[in-house]
Image (cartoon, grey):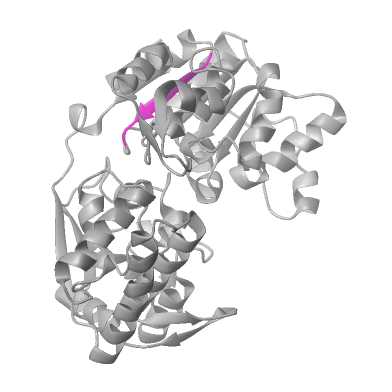
Amino acid sequence: MNISNLHNYQNRAVQFILEKPSCALWLSMGLGKTAVCLTAINELMSDQFIINQTLIIAPLRPCQHTWPNEIEKWDHTKHLSHTFIGGPKKQRMTRVDGKEDIHIINRDNVTWLVDYWIQKKRWPYSLIIIDEASSFKSPSSKRFKALKKVIGKTKKVVELTGTPASNSYLDVWSQIYLLDKGERLGRTFTNFKSNYFSSDYMGYTWDILPGAEKQIQDKIGDLILSMKAEDYIELPDQIKNTISIDIPPVTRKQYREMEKTLLLELENETVEALNAAVLTNKLLQITNGAIYLPDKPDTWQEIHNFKIDALEEIINEHPGQPVLVAYCFKSDLARIKKKFPHAVDIKEEGAIEKWNRKEINLLLAHPASAGHGLNLQTGGNIIVWFGLNWSLELYDQFNARLHRQGQTEPVMIHHILAKETIDETVFEVLQGKQINQNTLLNALKDNIKNRGNI
């Protein structure tokens, strides 16, 4: 089939879905995965009569905005009925038995949905589409275990992601399992690891064996359609800029003490995931200007406002232009809104639509809330990273909210970085396009040593 208002590469992706029992589209951000899938749904349901109901699993905001908007946007899909099964349980219960063509659900409610239908002793969905399938990369997660129970009752599964292995090839197993029930990479995650990876004696780290990457690619290649945006569409330039700030001497002293604690654990090789996350988050809090108090998870104390001042300077340099700000902590959000009362949190009702109509000059978003699926490119072309986190997936996805098909202006991405701190380390590793916990911690350890002041 060929839909005239789709691009040729999109029609190719539609055909791939139709031909495969189950498959994954590893497409770069901005290539129109949503339109591709909706076209395939229409063909499978209306023309081929292969499927009945479709379940779309996605992050919350794409559930509420992107998928409904795209269904109603296209002439060949707007006849498809749909409902979002979200909100409180009482509200979900009123919709879960609906006969609409498409049910859309937030990935956090997948376990509830599976349990509901298991109790009913049936599974109504013949097609499952998993938007941002990398969110099912953990085989120990409840959402993966839940979906695993009903995959055998589903005719076809389609996975969508631009970052299938943002941390390592370990992320691939569970995603492929949901497509082939373990046929290609093995039926257990344990065997997958032992076949393709080697670990340290404690089992904390796993490194891929020589040649194993190609072996994995060869085994799963028939299930995957991979496309890069630069091969199919022309986008405006993406310009990255760093703004370096000095934190106050008293704050820097506090920061150095925290670094010593982290370095000591790294040198003794006793650092665990939980401790590493806590310590690196504390360092990031200090550089951003507010630190959470011990044993009081919702209470924070401001220790400097240098990043707030830097953000104000950036805004003043772009007078009248909309600015999208990425923040890390709730304290960041509160402090930015206090300084700029006109700022709007993306979670506020109607914020996305107002932004795209250029009615918002300062939009604030956490990368985890706006990192997937949202189309924000018509609202502006300026991003400010008030504070970085060390997820490459969220970093790339957030930037792609503006740097995507439909953007007409060069996208300016500002990073506010505190000098000689974890900010610079995270930024450098992110630009290297390979990051996981060990990468960050090793780079941080090297940078601390190289500064020679500990």
Q: Where residue 349 appears, x then y in whole percent?
A: 54, 64
Quadrant where the C terminus sits is: bottom left
**Is 418 located above or below residue 339 in the figure?**
above
Whether residue 27 can be seen here: yes
**Is 197 located above or below residue 251 in the figure?**
above
Q: Where residue 159 appears, x then y in whole percent?
A: 49, 27
Residue visible at 15% across and 65% down in the picture? 450
**Is 335 located above or below residue 174 in the figure?**
below
Residue visible at 51% across and 63% down in the picture? 347
Which residue range is magenta in the image?
22-28
Residue 2's image quarter? top left
Q: Nearer the viewer, residue 441 or 86?
A: 441
Q: Nearer the viewer, residue 236 or 422?
A: 422
Residue visible at 46% across and 44% down in the picture? 204
Q: Where residue 320 appears, x then y in whole percent?
A: 22, 73
Residue 102's image quarter? top right
Whether residue 326 can be seen here: no
Q: Main secondary structure of the magenta part?
A: strand
Q: Is residue 19 magenta?
A: no
Q: Nearer the viewer, residue 47 or 279?
A: 279
Q: Is 116 on the left-hand or right-hand side of 209?
A: right
The single residue placed furthest to the right in the displayed view is 120
Q: Is 40 on the left-hand or right-hand side of 389?
A: right
Q: Nearer the viewer, residue 275 or 225?
A: 275
Q: Where residue 398 appears, x then y in whole percent?
A: 34, 52
Q: Is 375 on the left-hand or right-hand side of 87?
A: left
Q: Is residue 23 magenta?
A: yes
The single residue placed furthest to the bottom in the displayed view is 250
Quadrant where the N terminus sits is: top left
